[in-house]
């Protein structure tokens, strides 16, 4: 495991962070729920393997991630990590809600304080609302009374909104989406440069862009295979992000033991400046390959859900992208029929636009759903 100083905070942090949004699940009473003993063992194995940053949030696993993280951090594990959780800004209607939610989260986590407390998923509108409700004064007071150590935010919007937020307060960390397809999206390269200028360390989410970068099509895999140095697709994607010195920790939502073992092995080498010039040229080539093949830039974050008509928006997009990536669009209608049978197909969209207002990627969701529906019903 590689470690780097966490900005000016005076401690080192592991470059791999354990994201607790995709913990292992098992069927319980006919529903999928976190497999608690396995999840606890997995988080602890990650910490034993050198991970020193654990990330959770109020809504993960329908509210069950925080209590499970709390269990995992018993028996001395809490002292070995920096713990991050997030204020669900969308649930905040008054200043008092902020204190109430933080207290609820500390109680679910069974800890007296968290290290990093993030305003969750800020975009321009949400930032304005949170500011007007007193979020910055709340963060100051929570630091003062010892419930949080480092006020932070996670972010989904464009560079201009990022610049406005990061310059408005003495943030101790910002969590951004970054990967080799998103250098000009979201905060992007310009956001990283600005964070460096402001001395704000970054935590990166979506390093594999919803897993897509770990599952390349044959032609993209062929680009990697032709390169003299052999690494897995996930390895290249993590190295791309970890090459950047302003990035302290890279989150991976790990769901099983094999994935953890693989990540621990990869992160032995994910140092700042780990890419050579020819590695960077390889990644530029991969970027172009993906851009040609993934028409819809959906990360699967699910902020657009629920749709009032029941459209499974990210699932429809994922399927369409995958059939495109694998040059298999002529077989897409049979997959699409499964969505029709489950009554969550793109064709149910009535173009109300509610989903587009929530999409951090600003995707024209309605138009894409129409495209998906046409491809799914081709020949009918
Ligand atoms: S625009 Fe379509 S997909 Fe989006 S919320 Fe409305 S009905 Fe659902
Ligand atoms: S359409 Fe937008 S909000 Fe919905 S899952 Fe994709 S990226 Fe997220």
Image: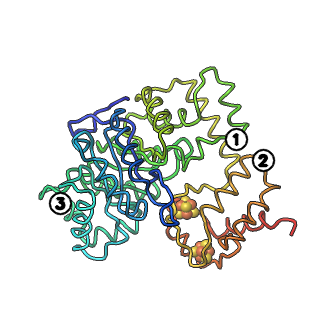
Query: Can you see residue 144?
Result: yes
Coordinates of residue 304 in the picture (x, y in percent): 53, 67
Label 2 with label 3: CB-CB less than 8 Å: no
Q: Nearer the viewer, residue 10 or 76?
A: 76
Residue 66, placed above or below residue 234: below
Disc 2: residue Cβ within 8 A of ligand 2's nearest atom: no
Q: Indicate which disc residue 142 carries.
A: 3
In the image, 260: left or right of 41?
right
Label 1 with label 2: CB-CB less than 8 Å: yes
- Report the image quarter containing ligand 1: bottom right
Badge 2 crowding class, 10 Å Cα cut-off, few under 14, some 14 to 19, many 20 or more, is few
Per the model, the C-alpha gap separating discs 3 and 1 is: 47 Å
Q: Residue furthest top?
A: 228
Callout 1: helix, strand or loop?
loop
Callout 3: helix, strand or loop?
helix
The structure residue drawn at horizontal position 12% and vertical position 59%, both measured from the top left corner, is 145
The structure residue drawn at horizontal position 59% and vertical position 42%, both measured from the top left corner, is 213
Per the model, the C-alpha gap separating discs 2 and 3 is: 52 Å
For residue 49, which quarter of the picture? top left
Q: Earlier in the sequence, mark 2 or mark 3?
A: 3
Label 3 with label 1: CB-CB less than 8 Å: no
Give the labeled residue for mark 2. 327
């Amino acid at each position: 495991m590689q470690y780097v100083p966490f900005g000016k905070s005076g401690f080192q942090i592991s470059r791999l962070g354990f994201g607790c949004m995709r913990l292992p699940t098992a069927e319980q009473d006919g529903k999928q729920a976190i497999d608690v003993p396995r999840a606890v063992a997995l988080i602890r194995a990650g910490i034993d393997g050198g991970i020193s940053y654990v990330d959770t949030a109020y809504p993960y696993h329908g509210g069950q991630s925080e209590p499970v993280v709390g269990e995992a951090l018993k028996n001395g594990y809490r002292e070995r990590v920096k713990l991050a959780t997030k204020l669900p800004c969308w649930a905040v209607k008054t200043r008092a809600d902020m204190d109430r939610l933080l207290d609820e989260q500390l109680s679910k986590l069974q800890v007296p304080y968290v290290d990093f407390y993030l305003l969750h998923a800020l975009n321009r509108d949400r930032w304005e609302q949170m500011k007007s409700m007193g979020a910055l004064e709340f963060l100051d007071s929570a630091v003062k009374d010892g419930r949080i150590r480092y006020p932070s935010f996670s972010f989904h919007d464009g560079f201009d909104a990022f610049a406005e937020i990061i310059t408005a307060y003495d943030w101790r960390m910002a969590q951004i989406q970054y990967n080799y397809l998103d250098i000009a999206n979201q905060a992007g390269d310009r956001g990283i440069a600005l964070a460096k200028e402001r001395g704000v360390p970054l935590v990166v989410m979506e390093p594999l862009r919803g897993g897509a970068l770990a599952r390349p099509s044959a032609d993209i895999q062929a680009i990697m295979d032709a390169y003299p140095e052999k690494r897995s697709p996930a390895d290249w994607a993590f190295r791309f992000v970890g090459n950047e010195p302003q990035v302290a920790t890279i989150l991976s939502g790990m769901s099983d033991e094999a994935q953890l073992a693989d990540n621990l092995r990869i992160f032995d080498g994910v140092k700042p400046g780990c890419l050579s010039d020819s590695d960077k040229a390889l990644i530029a080539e991969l970027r172009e390959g993906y851009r040609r093949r993934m028409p819809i830039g959906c990360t699967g974050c699910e902020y657009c859900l629920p749709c009032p008509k029941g459209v499974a928006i990210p699932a429809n997009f994922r399927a369409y992208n995958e059939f495109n990536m694998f040059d298999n669009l002529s077989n897409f209608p049979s997959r699409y029929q499964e969505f029709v049978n489950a009554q969550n197909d793109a064709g149910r969209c009535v173009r109300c636009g509610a989903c587009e207002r929530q999409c951090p990627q600003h995707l024209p969701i309605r138009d894409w759903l129409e495209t998906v529906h046409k491809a799914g019903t081709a020949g009918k």
